[in-house]
Image (cartoon, grey):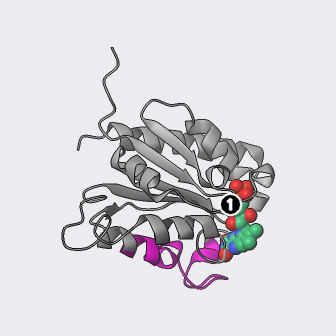
Amino acid sequence: MTLPAPNPVLVLLAHPDPGTSRVNRAMVEAVRGLDGITVHDLYAAYPDFHIDVREEQARCNAHRVLVFQHPFFWYSCPALLKLWMDEVLTYGWAYGVHAEGLRGKRLLSAVSTGGSAQAYTVEGYHGRTLESLLAPFDQAARLCGMTYLPPFPFHAARRAGDDAILRHAETYRAHLTALRDAEA
Ligand SMILES: Cc1cc2nc3c(=O)[nH]c(=O)nc-3n(C[C@H](O)[C@H](O)[C@H](O)COP(=O)(O)O)c2cc1C
């Protein structure tokens, strides 16, 4: 008999163009079908952008670790994940005095960027670190009583070779299974 995972992981995948994806596709392939890890492809589920809020909240209730997996778009997430936050993270459920929907859970940003790691430094091309640009996600997690984990980035995505992408996908699988299996 297989025991249930201590910390079921919900991967909220937001990639509007999976046909052109190399990095996010490899990452998803590495974790899809694993016990205790649910991959929820937002663009596949909601091509019309009509999010089922109740169903999304119920899915969050059933998991202890949330992962926002997406390519970095204009220093943020693709539009459908932002809409998911706007609509699913409601007052009274996600935040507010008695809100318990996400309290005590953990949030991980797993992002791929076109820019290099060096570009995401204060001295670099973008002039800011990835962590500082992800502040809205960190702050949203805090408001909801969650712990925001250190981000899991993959940089210079377009220039990356297949080997590097495969290694990253394998590291991703190890990272998510470790979060799933960690003592509470
Ligand atoms: C609309 C759009 C906006 C983007 N904005 C950024 C950005 O702000 N910073 C960055 O480093 N890369 C940016 N990129 C590059 C993507 O992040 C990169 O192509 C993606 O992470 C590659 O992952 P994939 O192989 O899964 O598609 C952007 C790409 C698109 C299409």
Q: Is 146 rendered above or below residue 1?
A: below
Q: Which residues are magenta?
A: 118-139
Q: 67 and 51: which one is in front?
A: 51
Q: Would residue 106 be visible to someone looking at this image?
A: yes
Whole-percent x, y for residue 54 in the image: 42, 55
Report which residue position mark 1 lands on. Answer: 48
- List the single residue furthest toward the left: 98
Q: Quadrant of ligand 1?
A: bottom right
Whole-percent x, y for residue 51 in the image: 55, 59
Whole-percent x, y for residue 104 in the image: 25, 56
Q: Residues within 10 Å of mark 1 (few under 14, many from 20)?
A: few
Q: 167 and 73: which one is in front?
A: 73
Residue 121 found in image quarter? bottom right
Instruction: Tally the marks.
Output: 1
Determine the residue positioned at 67% across, 82% down. 125
Q: Is residue 14 left or right of residue 86?
A: right
Q: 49 and 123: which one is in front?
A: 49
Determine the residue positioned at 32% across, 72% down. 91
Q: 177 and 137: which one is in front?
A: 137
The magenta stretch spans residue 117:
no
